[in-house]
Amino acid sequence: MEYILPFLPEKIKNLPIHMDFDGQKRAERYFQIIIILFAVVGFVWGYITQQFSQTLYILFAGVTVSALLTLIPWSIYRRKPLQWQAVLDQASKGASQQGSANMTQLKTKKKKLKD
Amino acid sequence: MGSFDFLDEVRRMNGRQLYYQVLNFGMIVSSALMIWKGLMVVTGSESPIVVVLSGSMEPAFHRGDLLLLTNHREEPIRVGEIVVFKIEGRDIPIVHRVLKVHEKENGTVRFLTKGDNNSVDDRGLYAKGQLWLEKKDVVGRAKAFLPYAGIVTILMNDYPKFKYAILAFLGLFVLTHRE
Amino acid sequence: MNSFTSRLNSLFAFTLSVMAALTFCCFLTTVFNDHIRPVELNVAKVLVKNVPDYSADRERSDLGLITFDLSTDLQPIFNWNVKQLFLYLTAEYKTSEHALNQVVLWDKIVERGDNTILDLKNAHTKYYFWDFGNGLKGNSNVTLTLSWNVIPNAGTLPKVQGSGSHKIVFPDQYTSGRI
């Protein structure tokens, strides 16, 4: 990725490709719900037709759908950007302290999302 | 992620963390060993899970399918069963079906096997002059089957470089990733 | 860090777990099926010869020569977790030397979608009916049964004996010469 980056035109480079934290959470939820739904439908259909392959095909369809919906960083996953605190004056006292406090807060939030 | 990030990761750890990672790695290896040995006790087989390495049992088993074996002493060997056996002078055990059984009153048994996909029985595969298999040759009898689950083993066997790459990658991953 | 690849990784892992769960549920829906079917067996020609067994130890052994009729319908066995049936016709008998002898005379693989109605008339055996010694002449208690090994998509490998058998009575005299 890093090797081709300099050759891309500005326009493409500037496309936003991130998800905000809320978006990441929702993306994960979505693909889990979609895949489980397709799996349940596929299981019932496979049982009716007595063909386990049908179950798997339906599951793969669900995987494709959820991949399209949640792998690509669509703009709906960027609706709740982090509200950063305003930049404090460097000279003012306690700025560094507050900054580090902010950082730890962020870290715990990140960890939660990871889980 | 760049390919040499892990070096930075190692550099960032202090002695205690590095020690912890190594211990963690040892824990994973030893628990895997424990599960394997535990399965050996429960199933009575010296290798309770085997991957099918040849196509001689097609279309039942294909290369890369996984078989669960048991080998309890009181379980008799009967015709139609799929057994995994070792032949003197061959490293790799063979998975074939029992074709003939001759059992004496005292329990000593002689049997002959054949692969579903082979046109002749296995006498050509046995050691020179060996006509029958005996109970001591058996590694286990196939009890359950899972398709494709051993495909990584097949890839590792076919491409040894791939095996070392995977082992190196997994080892580094466990050593360098903290949680 | 959340990125395209990390999302792809978790999607892949989740799909694999769901697939494993589905496979296991599929196995659970079929685990209590008994797979038993009625089989009609009959024997037309029964002869026994005493000739050297060149496939084994070259000793003079009893060779049974039979032709058989077989009719059954296995359609009800096939469900969504049956990939294949391995049918085998077994002759089981007792001799003075061995308490139990089992010899497979004929086998057939019936895959999903194949014709499941079997109706054989005057069929020849696929494998030679060699006894281990000379225990076939005058043996009036040789039982012929059809069994099958059910190969699932995933799960256990049950061995089932069809209901219905046929008793062969071998003549007291060896047949000599050709046929």
Image (spheres, coloured by chain):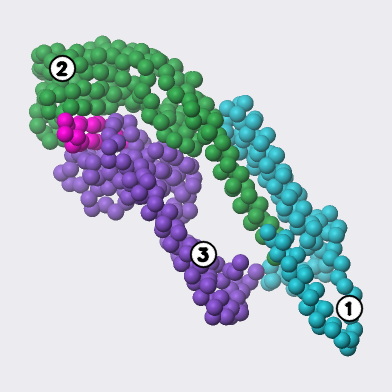
x and y, in percent, of residue C37 in the image: 42, 18
Instruction: Give the label, 2 or 1, closer to the camera.
Output: 1
State the residue in front, A103 or B11: A103
Instruction: Give the label, 1 or 3, closer to the camera.
Output: 1
The Cα–Cα distance between marks 2 and 1, rounded to whole angstroms, is 101 Å
In the image, the segment drawn in magenta is: B95-112
Q: Residue at x 34, y 15 (%)?
A: C164
The chain letter corresponding to cyan is A
Is residue B59 visible to the viewer in this orientation of the structure? no
Instruction: Specify the colour of chain C.
Output: green
- Say which residue label 1 marks: A87
Quarter residue A12 falls in: bottom right
Q: What amino acid is labelled 3 in the image?
A: Leu
Indicate whether residue B103 is drawn in magenta.
yes
Please give left or right for residue A98 compared with residue C80 in the image: right
SS for callout 3: helix
- Say which residue label 3 marks: B170
Q: Residue at x 61, y 44 (%)?
A: C18
Return the residue found at the far bottom: A91
x and y, in percent, of residue C73 in the image: 44, 16
Mark 2 on the same chain as mark 1: no
The Cα–Cα distance between marks 2 and 3, rounded to whole angstroms, is 63 Å
- Say which residue label 2 marks: C139
Quarter residue A63 falls in: top right
SS for callout 2: loop
